[in-house]
Image (spheres, rainbow, N blue to C red):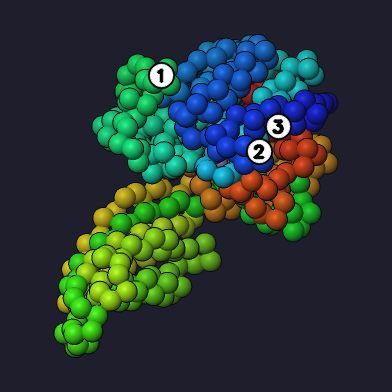
Amino acid sequence: MKLNIDQRLLQSEIDALAGYSSEPPPVVTRVVYSRADREARVYVKGLFADAGLEVREDAVGNTFARWVGSDPELAPIGTGSHIDAIPNAGKYDGVVGVLGGLEAIRALQRGGFRPRRSIELLLFTAEEPTRFGIGCPGSRMLSGVLTVEAAGKLRDAEGESLDGLRAAAGFCGELSGVALPRGYFEYFVELHIEQGPLLEREGLSIGIVQSIAAPAGLNVLIEGEGGHAGTVLMPDRKDAFLAGAELALAIEGLTLELGGLDTVATVGTCNVFPGAVNSIPSRVQMSLDLRDTDGARRDRVLDAVGVAAKEIAVRRRVAIATELLNADAPASCDPNIIEAVRAACEAHGVTYREMVSRAYHGSLFMDQVCPMGMIFIPCRGGVSHRPDEYSSPEQIAAGALVLAETLARLAGGGE
Ligand SMILES: [Zn+2]
């Protein structure tokens, strides 16, 4: 169908939303439930209402804005993303999916389209792990992957509980009401910046996501024996850091050996105690972030890491304890959504390629609720989570256009 994206309006809203930040521009810092986040929500909800959408919020602030279809009993088509931003971030991550989703709906409205299924725009209360140390808390709760009990235990670095923080932000009600029933949406499709370099490098407008890689997180604690760096001779040492170093290299080796191209492992933190130049490390805390598009393959690497840890512990006479923080299931995008996005690109002469999402998004958890898909647009240099994150107004408009056409195809209906 003929669709006009108001590129200038969309860009002005993206720029305005970037003004809701805890730090001055060009930095965007918008941690969930912070003042900047609360004010940003007011602004965005105003835009939803202006478009004639019915807005509701759940007990943690996931926000739903519905364009009621001609057959309101049918499960709606969902779209949306997040507006929270990690410290020192830019203005496009997540935002493109929320405001681009809104503009997609407005473009359909302007074109005189009347959807058969309702179209519901969803703002996940948070996608970033900044506040609670766990990624995608909003969609995790919507999907039920994060249970009510576990959500009740979430605390931020200051020790503030989710319950206290959500109440202060004006969100009350039972956490048990947050999880969506399976099939709540007929389909869910999220527009997002790629956060990688492939689309820009190949000069393409759209990435049609085939699957989303999922992370497993491991906390590793190594207990050795401290001592004087001068007096304890090498054969007598139980150096916790050297055991950790060996484990980190074993993780790399096992990932290369047992994993595939999509298997990636990162030891991103390593805290050494007591942390003095003349003291043998007695204790080490390390983290492992292991991701793959193939959950079974990832878990084989994870198992092998456990075996390696045991072997290193025995040989080096230290204790190694591992705690599995999360092991999320990777998700495949739904073939019908992939086909609808492809058809939308073809209908509007927009270039595209298929790709894997190596970062995870709210859609990874929405996969537990309904079939899902994702649409990527290019971002300059593949840069994200930085103030210089950038997608051009034209690139964003192309994404909104393809999303609008996709939503129309999935919702059914006509002019
Ligand atoms: Zn994001």
Which residue, given by chain and number where applicable, does mark 2 sit on?
Answer: 25
Q: Quadrant of the C terminus?
A: top right
Q: Nearer the viewer, residue 225 or 356?
A: 225
**Would you say the beta carbon of the disc 1 residue lies within 8 angstroms of ligand 1?**
no
Q: Amino acid at mark 1?
A: Phe
Q: Report whether 356 appears left or right of 324.
A: right
Provide the secondary structure element on which disc 1 rests: loop
| Other residues around mark 2 within 10 Å, as few (<14) / some (14–19) / many (≥20) | some
Q: Amino acid at mark 2?
A: Pro
Instruction: Name the quadrant of the N terminus.
Output: top right
Point out the frontmost of discs 1 and 3. 3
Q: Is residue 46 left or right of residue 180?
A: right
Q: Is residue 4 above or below residue 195?
A: above
Where residue 94 appears, x then y in whole percent? 59, 37
- View quadrant of ligand 1: top right
Task: Give coordinates of residue 235: x percent, y percent.
Answer: 19, 88
The quarter of the displayed image where residue 7 is located:
top right
Viewer-proximal residue among 402 and 140 = 140
Q: Which residue is mark 3?
A: 15
Q: Is residue 116 visible?
A: no
Q: From the image, tell me which residue sits under label 1.
A: 171
